[in-house]
Amino acid sequence: QVQLVESGGGLVHPGDSLTLSCAASRNIASFYVMGWYRQAPGKQRESVATVTSGGTTAYDDSVNGRFTISRDLSKNTLYLQMNTLKPEDTAVYLCNAVLRGTGAGDYWGRGTQVTVSS
């Protein structure tokens, strides 16, 4: 069983920055891919940014150039640095990890709320 716990959300103004963290209960280097997703009220969950076990990153066009996904393997933690936040970034942000092999599965955290409002 894998546990993912997000933190770092909050209420910020447009243009502000925020960093989200996702602490994993096991060695994150073992995950095939990890990522940040978000879900706004009345909308489908969407991918924000992903990083593979090899370190390859990918971003949704809406956040490319503003958000940065990174990992700290020594802390088993995934991060999402969010800059120049916009009201349309308001959503619950969820951490995801895909594990293959022993214990294979698609794991999710409970999410952290990010609200961007003036």
Image (cartoon, grey):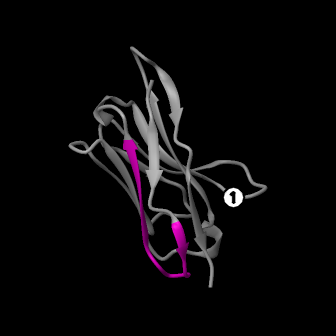
Tell me where residue 66 appears, x and y as whole percent: 45, 69
* Residue at x 42%, y 21% (from the top left corner): 100
Quarter of the picture holding the N terminus: top left
Residue 82: in sight, yes or no? no
Nearer to the camera, 107 or 44: 107
Q: Which residues are magenta?
A: 10-23
Tell me where residue 113 appears, x and y as whole percent: 58, 60
Q: Which residue is mark 1?
A: 40
Quarter of the picture holding the C terminus: bottom right
Tell me where residue 103 appears, x and y as whole percent: 43, 17
Amino acid under disc 1: Ala
The image quarter in which residue 97 lies: top left
Q: Is residue 115 left or right of residue 105?
A: right
Query: Is residue 102 depicted above or below 15 in this figure?
Result: above
Q: Is residue 60 left or right of residue 18?
A: right
Query: Is residue 9 depicted above or below 107 in this figure?
Result: below
Q: Is residue 85 magenta?
A: no
Tell me where residue 17 appears, x and y as whole percent: 44, 74
The image quarter in which residue 51 lies: top left
